[in-house]
Image (cartoon, rainbow, N blue to C red):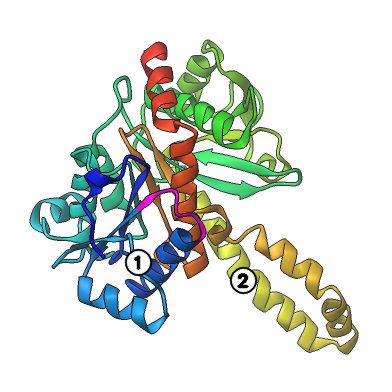
Amino acid sequence: MSLPSSDFPKCRIVVDAMGGDFAPHHEVIGALSAFSENKLFHLILVGDDEKIKAIAKENNLSLDGVELIHSEEIITMNDSPTSALKTKQKSSLVIGAKLVASGGADAFVSTGNTGAVAAAGTLLIGRLAGVERPTIGTYIPNMTGITTVFDVGAFVDSKPQHMLGYAQLANVYVKEMFGIEKPTVGLLSVGEENEKGNKLTKETFELLKSSKLNFFGNIEGRDILTGKVNIVICDGFVGNILLKFGESFLKILKPMLKKTADANFFDKVKIAISRNAIRKSFKVFDPNEYGGIPLLGVKAITIIGHGSSTVYGIKNMVLKAKEMYDKKLIAKLAKEMNKEN
């Protein structure tokens, strides 16, 4: 059943149903699963409405109370982000972002082309006052909890003032979403000493040092998994390489364990006995557990998921958007950036 967004004063979440590698199946099932679990928001699915209806029917999922908006085009992973925003105006990504930009919705969730979602957030939804560059963050498990990393690819070229902005945005995000009153901020560099690094990190170090943030200082790559700091700051070029390396970790670790088990009977028995512990360890590295990654610095909640996100992952993305709305994250980010700048 399709109902106008204006009839719903509660949180309105737009899901780009055509973005991911398994769209629209995973997107539709995941979003509807989130909606069936928590109906305290209004769900808007943007995509091929006939396919959406068919998937819902095949999986015995109700569309009652869900708004459907038809789209005719798809921005693919191979499309140029900024060009696609101009040439594919009838795509689910553009329609969804424009709906949020116009005030017709409060949050945008997409597993589509990361660059296109970031561009849509920046150019269509718009930046918060005081934000020069929005930033994308990710979560990396550590020995005691979660380390967040900003930026991981919203922009590959950053200036020191952009890096300071990433830290200010991340500080609010971690404080509100993780309940850490004074998150520690570390600058990713090639050494812990203050003078280590390149021109960008050295200049950024001075800005962070003189800011009101709880700045720890420089950290090295080996410190990320130990949980030395709550927030790691780096430019998008380095951050994206770090992100992709992390994604490859589990892909190679599982085959390596199997190879070890196959080579020796006793190792196979040991691994079999430890199966539950291994499964739990792998689970914390699964990006589907964390509900996508946030694009911070834009005027509305924007969550980007991996193209290969599972149904469970997309469900968590939608619920994460609802949590961010409930915690008034955008208003708190806007207040902080206005104060800092």
42 versus 129 height, above or below: below
Between circles 2 and 1, the one closer to the viewer is 1
- Image coordinates of residue 3 in percent, x first then y, are 23, 56
> What residue would you read off at disc 1?
20
Asked whether 40 falls inside the magenta stretch, the response is yes
Image location (x, y in percent) of residue 266: 91, 85
Distance (Cα) linking label 2 and label 1: 23 Å
Report the amino acid beneath label 1.
Answer: Gly
Q: Residues within 10 Å of mark 1 (few under 14, many from 20)?
A: many
Which residues lie in the magenta part?
37-42
In depth, the one of 231 and 314 nearer the eye is: 314
Q: Quadrant of the C terminus?
A: top left
Residue 34 is inside the magenta segment: no
Q: Nearer the viewer, residue 268 or 88?
A: 88
Which amino acid is tagged 2? Answer: Ile
Give the prevailing secondary structure in the magenta stretch: loop
Marked residue nearer the N-terminal end (2 or 1): 1
Q: Residue at x 32, y 19 (%)?
A: 130
| Disc 2: which residue | 252
**Residue at image x 47%, y 69%?**
311
* Along the viewing direction, whichever of 12 and 95 lies nearer the viewer: 12
Q: Quadrant of residue 163?
A: top left
Left or right, 142 with respect to 124, comes to right
Q: Is residue 215 left or right of residue 166?
A: right
311 to 202, vertically: above or below: below
**Does the image show residue 188?**
no
Secondary structure under tag 2 reads helix
Give percent across and percent down for residue 22.
Answer: 37, 74
Residue 7 visible at all: yes
